[in-house]
Image (cartoon, rainbow, N blue to C red):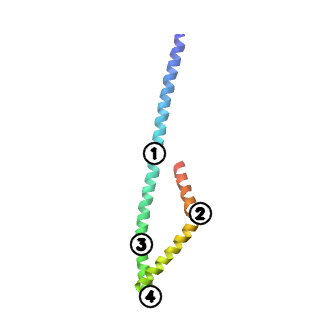
Amino acid sequence: MENQASLIGTLFEKAEHYAQTSAELLKLKAIDKSADVLSTLTARLAIIGFITLFFLTLNIGIALWVGEILGKTYYGFFIVAGFYALIGILLYVFRNNLVKEPLRNSIISQALN
């Protein structure tokens, strides 16, 4: 009987150790996944920042060039602004297909991989 009690005690100790190890493993996996998602997001934000600066400079150049062609500098800026207003309206109308779904799928695939 004493041997059986000893086996049950050992079994409970091993189960407790297994539960602690499993909890620690889940914690480490969550930290790894969070760090992966955060580092990917940070890298993408840095790239988006540089691309934004590039396009800002390019658009100012295009606006000045178009304005020079039309004879008034501000005409170029109005035309470039109108172009972006049109793109903004199109993005708003098609936001679910063009923005929301691809972004959601990207986040889900990042979290599951």
Rounded to the nearest angstrom, the CA distance separating label 1 from label 2 is: 31 Å
Cβ atoms under marks 1 and 2 closer than 8 Å = no
The front one of 70 and 46 is 70
- Residue highlighted by disc 2: 97
Which numbered disc, 4 or 1, marks the residue closer to the eye?
A: 4
Give the residue at mark 4: 69
Kindly identify the residue that appears in the image at 48 percent across and 80 percent down: 79
Q: Earlier in the sequence, mark 2 or mark 4?
A: 4
The answer to whether residue 62 is above or below residue 47 is: below
- Please provide percent x and percent y for residue 49: 41, 64
Q: Is residue 8 above or below residue 61?
A: above
Neighbor class of circle 4 (other Cα within 10 Å; few <14, some 14-19, many 20+) is few
Q: CA distance from mark 2 to mark 4?
A: 37 Å
Callout 3 environment at 10 Å: few (<14), some (14 to 19), or many (20+)?
Answer: few
First of labels 4, 1 by sequence position: 1
Q: Which residue lies at the image location 56% right of the left edge and 70% below the top edge?
A: 90
Picture quarter with the N terminus:
top right
Please name the residue that numbered disc 3 is placed on.
56
Query: Percent from the top left, x then y, of residue 107?
Result: 52, 54
Inspect this view and state whether residue 113 appears: no
Looking at the image, tell me whether mark 4 or mark 3 is earlier in sequence order. 3
Amino acid type at image mark 1: Asp
Q: Quadrant of residue 54?
A: bottom left
Q: Which is in the foreground here, disc 1 or disc 2?
A: 2
Mark 2 lies on a secondary structure that is helix
Q: At label 3, which amino acid type do we have?
A: Leu
Residue that protrudes farthest toward the bottom in the picture? 71
